[in-house]
């Protein structure tokens, strides 16, 4: 098992802690999945949606990337795993909810605010720079007003959630289902320091603690 480190120890704990009910659940999941929500989250190791929402296997369809971003709909665009996952979850799995979950102290948000990777080459931060350039406009505006302060980070974290929600609605199959009432697009923000979740109330434009 060279290279797995203590991951194998974790796997063994996972195996030995399973109840007969959990084992039955795994057997049922072999036949397919029917998740209750898609959660688009950051790949940050401190903000795991399955842990935060205390989800069971098969409950949530998770899409993770740097800064929990959703690109705009581009039918003839480059290879895009986020768009492919959204298309699969909505059109093939008929999920009823899509949740964009941002989090506190996000490294991608920090990089966007500082502009650290804007001129970087691929392999030296260029991939990161191109990806987070999606929120460059908001980042520049917020940085001009608030610098790199904690307030600026929170403002951009929230702005990126709103932008990703807006981008989701550029996907025709998302917009159509939302209009029909068979799909809901939601946003939330997780505080790492306090372990608290805030949900976006779009009608009022504010995040409220759950």
Image (spheres, rainbow, N blue to C red):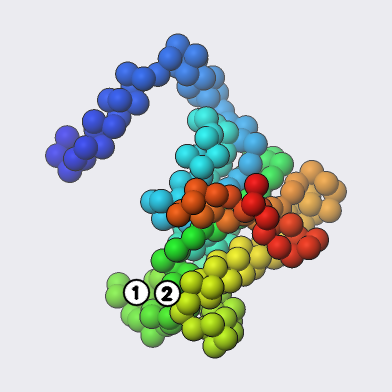
Q: Quadrant of the N terminus?
A: top left
Residue closest to the eye, 88 or 66 = 66
| Residue 96 in sight from this viewpoint | yes
* x and y, in percent, of residue 159 in the image: 62, 69
Question: Who is closer to the viewer here, 10 or 207?
Answer: 207
Which residue in the protein does label 2 denote? 111
Q: Disc 1 versus disc 2: distance between alpha carbons?
A: 10 Å
Q: Residue at x 53, y 24 (%)?
A: 29
14 relative position to 23: left or right: left
Q: Is residue 90 above or below residue 20?
A: below
Q: Helix or strand or loop: what does disc 1 sit on?
A: loop
- Give the image quarter of residue 202: bottom right
Mark 2 surroundings within 10 Å by alpha-carbon count, few (fewer than 14), some (14 through 19), many (20 or more):
some
Q: Residue at x 57, y 81 (%)?
A: 142
Q: Position of residue 179 (x, y in %)?
A: 84, 53
Q: Quadrant of residue 128?
A: bottom left
């Amino acid at each position: 098992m060279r290279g797995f480190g203590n991951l194998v120890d974790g796997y063994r704990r996972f195996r030995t802690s399973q109840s007969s009910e959990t084992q039955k659940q795994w057997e049922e999941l072999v036949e397919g999945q029917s998740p209750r929500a898609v959660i688009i989250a950051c790949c940050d190791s401190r903000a795991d949606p399955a842990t935060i929402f205390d989800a069971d296997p098969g409950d949530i369809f998770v899409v993770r990337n740097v800064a929990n971003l959703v690109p705009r709909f581009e039918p003839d665009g480059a290879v895009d795993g986020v768009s492919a996952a959204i298309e699969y979850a909505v059109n093939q799995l008929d999920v009823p909810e899509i949740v964009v979950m941002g989090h506190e102290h996000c490294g991608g948000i920090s990089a966007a605010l500082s502009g650290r990777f804007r001129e970087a080459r691929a392999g030296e931060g260029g991939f990161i720079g191109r990806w987070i350039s999606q929120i460059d406009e908001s980042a520049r505006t917020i940085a001009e007003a608030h610098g790199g302060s904690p307030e600026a980070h929170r403002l951009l974290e929230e702005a990126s959630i709103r932008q990703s929600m807006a981008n989701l609605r550029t996907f025709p199959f998302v917009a159509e289902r939302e209009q029909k009432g068979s799909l809901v697009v939601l946003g939330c923000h997780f505080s790492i320091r306090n372990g608290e979740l805030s949900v976006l109330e779009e009608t009022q434009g504010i995040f409220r603690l759950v």
